Image (tube, rainbow, N blue to C red):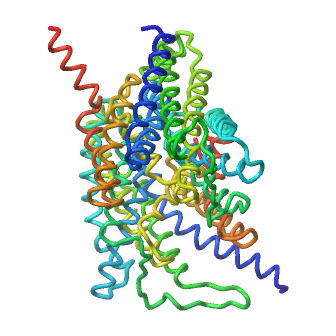
Amino acid sequence: MSSRVFAAVAFAVAIGFAAASQLIPNEYYFTAAYTVLQFVILATAWNILGGYTGYVNFGSAAFFAIGAYTTVFLYNAYKAPLLVMIVAGTLVAGLAGLGLGYLTLRLRGVFFAIASLALSVVLFTFIVNWDYVGGARGAYVLQPREVPFGLPRYIHLLYVVMVLQAAVSLIVARTIEKSTIGRGLAAIRDDELAAECSGVPTLRLKIFSTMVSCALMGMAGTTFPYYLSFIEPTSAFSLSYAVNSIAMPLIGGMMSWIGPLIGAILLGSVQQLVQVMFSLGAWNLLIVGVLLVLFVTLAPNGIMGWVDAWRRRKGR
Amino acid sequence: MDASTALVINAIIAGLLLGGFYAAVSLGISISFGMLDVVNIAHPAFIILGSYVAYIVNDRFGFDPIFVSVVLSPLFFLLGMALYRIYYIAFEKRGQESLRGLAFFFGILFITEVTLVLIFGVDYRTVGTVYGDVTWRAGPVDFPMRLVVPFLVSVTMVVGVQLFLTHTFFGRAVLAVAQDQLALRLMGVNPVRVKELAFALSIATAGVAGAFLIVIQPVQPAIGREYIGLVFAVCVLGGMGSIWGTLIGALVLGIAESFTSTFFGPSWAPAVSFGLLLATLAFRPSGLLGR
């Protein structure tokens, strides 16, 4: 399937999905689906760098929060429309990713990983001390009373936005994966030195994929303040974003765009179920952590790894 | 002496005392990351675990937390051996340590933190010590004992480990692993065994450092995260695998943090180590005493 056909199909599915779900009378569905879709975007975005090149980004929460706080800033300063906020948050997060990549991607991969973790704490401290966006107390971002497109509630609009954002992320991920860039990234993952020797512009490709990956993470955060109507640094920088966006691709499989999608839907739904049935937030995180460690130790190629092995056995 | 000079001197003293503690916290990372090339980002989790072990024993029996941690350090040593075994079999042997090994340690960090939250909640825990509330005063300069005691034990531990590494056969084998594993194999030493024991030593130092931490400040499970950047900042700033570098880097960081707290407010202090880490990575990745 060519990238253009895939994009058309993805958008068609997304729009169909968004339209059909308007028939669901239960408000809870939209709240829950928002969270799962948020993880679909984060996991897909993380995989563009982590899965395709093998560079680990522990700073998903930081880029997510950049998106969220860009929205808060634009809300306080200009009461900007949602679309402007989404575009701005994506761009700012992309620029932050570019800066981080430019500074640390020349070094060994582990330094990038540590620096990305460091970035979350620096930004957290910065936001806590910045009163204009609420500081440590947090800020209210009220949902507009008028909902466009004749949708019944604002959460429906946010849900539709998230469905479209998820489609965009998947299209971007798949397009990169199937292009020459994707092959270059795969070469970096397998053997960076050999790739460099074969004329692959490794540094430029790494910085590019970092930028795209971080921009998409920022995009996932842009609607978050509206979703909660209130935002404070601890929730925006929650470590659960970092651990989830690593665990989901690892559990789903990192070699292609479909792995993070499977991982995110699976793990995201399980977390929603646990939350609803037992209302235990901390147990949720424990499950993710344990699954991450189990999969990474015992099934390093994730669910898609099993599928591939099964296919190979069947083909023989 | 006027007030501002006293303020500066107090900031320097507090920074040095804090830096000594940071050296103990980062010592293990200097061994595991600096020498063995095992990127153990779960190191702070073991520090917090050490804090809680010291807290439990102190709470039940009233023993001094630092004494407890030294006595119980063999437990952490065993834990370290087990952890390295798993890490070696699952990742290092298969050559997958760069991505999956990192994710593994991240998962361990996360599990430890969440488990501690589930057992103890997110309340801050403190320990009772005989020196906790004592402060020496030399004119306007304060020496709070809750910082001085960890500082002294910590510097002793760092110097002890350095002497151990340079003056014993096993220590030299660890240094050799850092330089050339193949050569070590040719000498008839098993590098995996050496790494296993050295990694166990690094976890043991984390356990002891955890006791220092809970003497210095109240502890709750999530504060471990603040130390992830700190330990790597100290390790990178000092120069990979150099114990003296770690000590110097820790003192520099301690003073920088103490000045930031004094003059800009304590809420900015966590950003110092990360800022220093980013700056080191950007301008001098080999660190102060790096080769």
- Residue A190 in which image quadrant: top left
Comparing B269 with B84, the one in front is B269
Residue B287 seen anywhere in this rendered image of the structure: no
Q: Residue at x 67, y 46 (%)?
A: A70
Q: Position of residue B24 (x, y in %)?
A: 48, 64
- Residue B37 in which image quadrant: top left
Quadrant assignment for the C terminus of chain B: top right
Comparing B243 with A249, the one in front is A249
Q: Residue at x 35, y 37 (%)?
A: A265
Q: Position of residue B10 (x, y in %)?
A: 71, 79
A127 vs A36, left or right, is right
The number of numbered badges drawn on the structure is 0
Q: Position of residue A200 (x, y in %)?
A: 55, 13
Q: Position of residue A155 (x, y in %)?
A: 51, 46
- Residue A36 in which image quadrant: top left
Comparing A137 with B183, the one in front is A137
Comparing A7 with B55, the one in front is A7
Above or below for A111 versus B277: above
B98 vs B89, left or right, is right
Q: Residue furthest right?
A: B2
Q: Residue at x 35, y 79 (%)?
A: B67
Above or below for A254 versus A104: above
Residue B84 seen anywhere in this rendered image of the structure: yes
Q: Residue at x 47, y 41 (%)?
A: A38
Quadrant assignment for the N terminus of chain B: bottom right
